[in-house]
Image: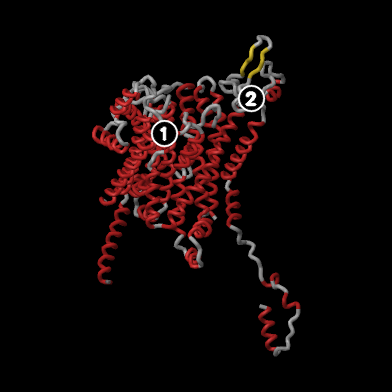
């Protein structure tokens, strides 16, 4: 087990390193001149380049970049070309906003999805089941931003219950709508998945056995059904959280949130592309993505005893084979 | 039966039997009865039967066909081009008036319900979905945008079929070092978020539909390659593959002629599900402003236009949203229907 996790972590770090390298190379090889002004003299440009470390070989630049990230935890000391703000001050603020909304959205998605899925499985063919099915069809087929626009139009404009835009002063009230619309897809997926898993487990023999031994109600559901039904759900949560990263782009545009998604869009579509930001955000996104995948893999491994058992069996078999091998020789 | 009897009879008659023409007539309709209750049918016929029994799938198919038809003929049903700004010369004031932000304006329907003609300047113009804030006809633009979505759908099919499928099949077939190398590659490609790829591409490509297609090309094949590899691993140790190899077939023939036809079910299903994802990606990139560029339009950029005016002109956002939602719904329905039709479970039969 520990070996597996260790291997997985090493793999993730290597992957991240390769991605960082690729991104860095791509961004640095791009044609273009960081000093477009013609008024600067050749010496001034030379001096500036030396100051920014652009005169060194590209591999050395890469080494410096990595060393800087690892030692100071920030993406370069240089301010970006975009509005002159240094990345070190803009990025943490943006990350804070994005993570708050994202965190609420994950909670909404997972908890409401779970509750809906359980309700649907326990009342098969009744109202909650139908509701769950309809929700999952809507969630899969209607793009989340269409849903967001409708929510905003009806509940902030026509019926002003919630503020139209997100603001940090009314944090809780103004974050409900963005989080809810962001979580629609994950909510419906978790609900559908939970329902199907629950139904499968409820039809299995050991639940029948538990029932025939006189177990019923909450105890049966929590101890016997949920415990087994929940394990595979961890596997769907990983891609969903990753989807949230993408969804954040649109949410931040629609609700006017200053988050990393908005930074990314600004960096791409703003006047001139901002290489430093694209690079920093690219690395940040990849780190998040790989980190979440890794974390959920480990959680899955810890939750499901079967994985551990099969590994042990495999080990035992291998040992047995080793013992047999010399005998055969 | 009867032939056997005849034979024994002929042997009994000690070689004096002379065969007559009657002996060579086929026995088909005499003893053999055809099983009509459980008649065997071809694979594709079965798939079609099961598919068309599924109401949702048929509804999805109809919607897709309708959208394709409208995308093809819609823009040419009226006289406006997708970037034409409609304007009319006003004789009273002597000025050119543009049809900015007109609500839906259909003279024929107006006459039908109220019995009179429009008496505004645009009495002869028909704007089924209205016009946008620059005075361009939304009907034309929406169907033009639907063309972009459909183009993305076809590009996805191409990427899935050519890149993803070949990659997965080859990786699964050769195994060993090739496989582990190719799988490491997949792992790395899979852990770069699509957004980052778009961002990096945007640093050296002109923004537009080409960028979206390249981004899809770099990311969309991964899911398909996993499915194709899994299918290959399932099939490659079967006996008929060994037979084929024994007869001297080369790897290429085994992969594409022997294995491929047997993996077609899961591959088609996966393809149908990746189409709505791709359409959504394009719409979403155009919505945030990385995708299609003016004066062209796609469903996503139309939704963005409508979103900017949502509080004052909410009708502008409805047509593109409906087209996008129906497209995604329809492709999902058809995908579901195909999955059930291609791999029927025993309890469904």
Disc 2 on helix, strand or loop?
A: loop
| Image spot of residue B329 (x, y percent) | 53, 39
Same chain, marks 1 and 2? yes
Give me the residue at 59% from left, 32% from top.
Answer: B144
Give me the residue at 66% from left, 80% from top.
Answer: B4
Looking at this view, name the residue that lies furthest to the right.
B21
Location of residue A318 by image quarter = bottom left
On residue B38, which mark appears? none
A194 displayed left or right of B11: left
| Image spot of residue B308 (x, y percent) | 49, 23
Label 2 crowding class (10 Å Cα cut-off): few <14, some 14-19, many 20+? many
Q: Which residue is mark 1?
A: B199
Are the residues at dot 1 and dot 2 in contact (C-beta closer than 8 Å)? no
Q: Please say whether residue A162 is visible from this viewpoint.
A: yes
Spatial CA distance of label 1 from label 2 is 38 Å
B74 displayed left or right of A302: right
Q: Earlier in the sequence, mark 1 or mark 2?
A: 2
Looking at this view, name the residue that lies furthest to the front.
A42
Give me the residue at 43% from left, 24% from top.
Answer: A271
Q: Which residue is mark 2?
A: B127
Closer to the camera, A302 or B31? A302
Q: Chain of mark 1?
A: B
Q: How is the image coloured?
A: secondary structure
Closer to the camera, B113 or B214? B214
Label 1 crowding class (10 Å Cα cut-off): few <14, some 14-19, many 20+? many
Q: Is residue A286 above or below residue B236?
A: above
| Image spot of residue B212 (x, y percent) | 48, 36
> What number of labels is visible?
2
Q: Chain of mark 2?
A: B
A147 displayed left or right of B63: left
Looking at this view, name the residue that lies furthest to the bottom.
B14
| Image spot of residue B213 (x, y percent) | 50, 38
């Amino acid at each position: 087990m520990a070996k597996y996790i260790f291997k997985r972590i090493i793999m993730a770090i290597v992957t991240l390193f390769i991605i960082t390298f690729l991104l860095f190379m791509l961004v640095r090889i791009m044609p273009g001149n960081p000093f477009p002004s013609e008024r600067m003299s050749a010496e001034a440009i030379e001096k500036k380049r030396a100051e920014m470390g652009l005169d060194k070989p590209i591999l050395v630049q890469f080494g410096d970049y990595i060393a800087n990230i690892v030692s100071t935890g920030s993406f370069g000391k240089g301010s970006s070309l975009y509005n002159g703000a240094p990345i070190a001050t803009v990025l943490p603020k943006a990350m804070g906003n994005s993570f708050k909304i994202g965190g609420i959205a994950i909670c909404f998605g997972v908890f409401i999805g779970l509750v809906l899925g359980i309700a649907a499985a326990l009342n098969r063919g009744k109202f909650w089941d139908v509701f769950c099915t309809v929700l999952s069809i809507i969630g899969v087929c209607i793009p989340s931003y269409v849903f967001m626009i409708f929510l905003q139009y009806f509940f902030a404009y026509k019926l002003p219950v919630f503020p139209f835009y997100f603001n940090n002063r009314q944090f809780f009230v103004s974050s409900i709508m963005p989080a809810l619309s962001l979580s629609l897809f994950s909510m419906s997926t978790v609900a559908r998945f939970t329902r199907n898993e629950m139904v499968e487990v409820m039809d299995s023999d050991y639940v029948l056995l538990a029932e025939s031994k006189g177990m019923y109600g909450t105890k049966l559901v929590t101890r016997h059904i949920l415990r087994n039904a929940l394990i595979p759900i961890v596997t769907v949560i990983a891609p969903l959280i990753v989807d949230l990263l993408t969804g954040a782009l649109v949410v931040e545009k629609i609700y006017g949130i200053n988050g990393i998604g908005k930074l990314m869009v600004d960096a791409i579509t703003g006047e001139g592309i901002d290489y430093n930001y694209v690079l920093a955000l690219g690395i940040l996104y990849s780190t998040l993505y790989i980190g979440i995948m890794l974390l959920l893999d480990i959680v899955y491994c810890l939750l499901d005893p079967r994985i551990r058992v099969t590994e042990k069996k495999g080990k035992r078999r291998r040992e047995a084979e080793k013992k047999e091998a010399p005998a055969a020789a | 039966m009867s032939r056997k009897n005849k034979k024994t009879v002929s042997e009994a008659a000690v070689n004096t039997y002379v065969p007559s023409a009657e002996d060579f007539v086929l026995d088909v309709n005499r003893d053999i009865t055809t099983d009509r209750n459980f008649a065997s049918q071809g694979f594709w016929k079965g798939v079609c039967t099961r598919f068309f029994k599924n109401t949702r799938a048929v509804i999805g198919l109809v919607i897709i066909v309708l959208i394709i038809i409208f995308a093809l003929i819609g823009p040419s049903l009226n006289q406006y081009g997708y970037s034409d700004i409609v304007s009319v010369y006003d004789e009273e004031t002597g000025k050119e008036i543009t049809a900015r932000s007109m609500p839906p304006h259909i003279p024929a329907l107006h006459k039908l319900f109220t019995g009179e003609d429009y008496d505004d300047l645009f009495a002869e113009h028909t704007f089924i979905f209205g016009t946008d804030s620059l005075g361009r006809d939304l009907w034309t633009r929406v169907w033009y945008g639907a063309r972009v979505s459909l183009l993305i759908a076809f590009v996805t099919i191409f990427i899935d079929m050519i890149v993803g499928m070949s990659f997965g099949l080859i990786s699964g077939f050769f195994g060993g070092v090739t496989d582990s190398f190719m799988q490491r590659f997949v792992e790395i490609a899979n852990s770069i978020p699509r957004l980052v790829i778009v961002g990096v591409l945007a640093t050296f490509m002109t923004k537009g539909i080409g960028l979206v297609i390249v981004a899809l090309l770099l990311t969309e094949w991964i899911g398909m390659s996993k499915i194709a590899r899994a299918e290959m691993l399932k099939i490659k140790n079967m006996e008929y593959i060994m037979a084929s190899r024994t007869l001297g077939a080369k790897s290429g023939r085994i992969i594409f002629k022997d294995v491929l036809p047997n993996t077609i079910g899961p591959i088609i299903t996966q393809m149908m599900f990746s189409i709505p994802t791709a359409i959504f990606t394009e719409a979403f990139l155009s919505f945030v402003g990385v995708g299609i560029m003016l004066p062209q339009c796609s469903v996503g950029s139309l939704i963005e236009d409508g979103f900017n005016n949502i509080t004052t002109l909410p009708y502008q956002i409805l047509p593109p949203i409906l087209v996008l939602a129906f497209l995604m719904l329809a492709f999902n329905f058809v995908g579901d229907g195909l999955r059930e039709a291609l791999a029927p479970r025993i309890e469904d039969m």
